[in-house]
């Protein structure tokens, strides 16, 4: 039984010190940051477009009346 626990401890130490999965985590964080930025940017763009179309609508409405 102590031999199995020693092997388990060695394996856990190897996994904790290993940096193989580090790149994947970094790429995932970058993708999440880009997605968040794009979402925030789209909301600001949508608000600006809505305001512009409302102004055009108001101006055209005044010319038609």
Image: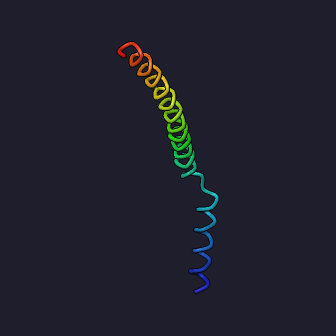
Which sits in the foreground, 17 or 57?
A: 57
x%, y% of residue 34? 53, 37
Q: What colouring does the structure picture have?
A: rainbow
Which is nearer the eye, 26 or 1? 26
Residue 56 drawn at (x, y percent) = 43, 19
As drawn, which residue projects farthest toward the front? 65
Quarter residue 54 falls in: top left
Q: Residue furthest left?
A: 64
Name the side, left or right, on which 58 lies relative to 23.
left
Residue 9's spot in the image, x, y percent?
62, 73
In the rendered view, tell whether residue 3 sits above or below residue 43: below
* Residue occupying image coordinates x 53% and y 44%: 32
Relative to 10, is 58 above or below? above
Provide residue 11's location: percent of width, then percent of height.
Answer: 58, 68
Residue sitting at 51 percent across and 27 percent down? 48
Residue 7 vertical placement versus 46 (above, below): below
Disc count in the image? 0
Which residue occupies 51% across, 36% down? 43
Residue displayed at 49% across by 33% down:
42
Q: Quadrant of the N terminus?
A: bottom right
Q: Residue furthest top?
A: 63
Q: Residue furthest bottom?
A: 1
Quadrant (top left, top right, bottom left, bottom right) of the C terminus: top left
């Amino acid at each position: 039984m102590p031999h199995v626990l020693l092997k388990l401890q060695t394996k856990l130490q190897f996994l904790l010190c290993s940096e193989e999965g580090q790149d994947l985590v970094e790429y995932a964080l970058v993708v999440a940051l880009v997605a968040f930025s794009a979402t925030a940017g789209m909301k600001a763009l949508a608000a600006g477009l809505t305001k512009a179309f409302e102004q055009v609508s108001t101006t055209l409405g005044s010319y038609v009346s």
